[in-house]
Image (cartoon, grey):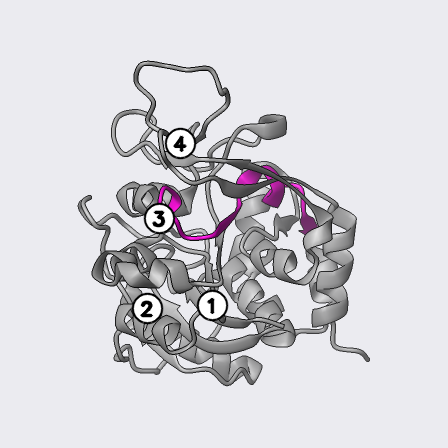
Amino acid sequence: MRTLIFDTDIGVDDAFALAYAAKTQRLLGITTVFGNVSVHQATKNARLFCEKMGIVAPVYRGCSRPLALAPGAPAKLHGEDGLGDAFENTYSDQAPGAVQFIIDSVRAQPHEITLVAIGPLTNIASAINQAPDIISQVKELVIMGGAFGTDGHAGNVTPFSEFNIWKDPHAADQVLSSALPVILLPLDVTHKVLIRGEEMHQLNQPVLSAICRPYLAYSLAKEGFDGMALHDTLTISWLCLPQAFTLTESPLRVITEGIASGQTVRKLSALASREDAFRDLPTQRIALQVDAQAVRTHFFNALKIKD
């Protein structure tokens, strides 16, 4: 069991990941960021979801826009409010600052805090920019983001780019090329772990069933699949069941402009080149294969409410 700071732009699959984390890890705090919804809505959503699910964790409000890009529109596949428009949300969007909370927490508990980031990486980049000393004090940073094209699993926003990285590529490039100890869960593995709509309802989790309806409808209309990939949830799967993942190691960068903006790239060859954008960068761990059934089984066992 790790002590987590859970960084999220909370939408439907984020909520599943948060529920899973609450069952299996020690939540120190939830930090919100823009992405699926505005940071204001994400802060309200985190409080609402915690109340509905009986999760006890303080909420902190993070960054409202990318480091360098103009703010973009929120995603809509999670419903207008990010949680499937299932509940009235009267919670406040005011909360203490997320970036300072991350810095203070890591300094107070060096080598003890696991950061889980399942939205744009703006809060994490801001924290290491303001306090570079915490880079060596973070236990690990587990990220859902990116895509490398393994088995055809490339971008979900552009042909190259995954949503979380695409929303703030400059922040992602700073984080992934830093000395933070990163474990990256890209679309290459998250697209391989699917649950059907009927399986979701078999969890006997009324809140999760309620919030996922627009997400399932979108999946059925766009992909012909009545179900969803457990994208963000795989960050917690890795913490619970690391033996289910096959990792590779490589320095990482993110393309920040042009038609491939938001693309995660890794060094594929050790051959010398005159212009090497990976020179002197640390290697990071990337999950490119997964035992999907083992991950699904652990997830269902952790979350299912017995009759």
Label 4 sits on what residue type?
Thr
The kind of residue tagged 2 is Gln
Q: CA distance from mark 1 to mark 3?
A: 18 Å
Distance CA(mark 3)–CA(mark 2) = 25 Å
Judged from the image, the secondary structure of the residue bearing numbered disc 4 is loop
Q: Which residues are magenta?
A: 175-195
Task: Inspect the image, locate mark 3, and give the three-letter code of the amino acid beneath it.
Answer: Val
**Which residue is tagged 2?**
41
Residue 111 got which mark? Answer: 1
Front: mark 1 or 4? 1
Tell whether position 189 is magenta: yes
Residue 295, percent across and down? Answer: 72, 54
Q: Mark 4 vs mark 3: which is more N-terminal?
A: 4
- Is residue 67 shown in magenta? no
As drawn, the label of residue 158 is 4
> Mark 2 to mark 1: distance in Å?
31 Å
Q: Who comes first in sequence, dot 1 or dot 4? A: 1
The circle drawn on residue 25 is none
Tell me the distance, in whole angstroms, between the alpha carbons under discs 1 and 4.
Answer: 36 Å
Q: Is residue 169 left or right of residue 143?
A: left
Q: Is residue 8 visible?
A: no
For discs 4 and 3, the disc positioned in front in the rendered view: 3
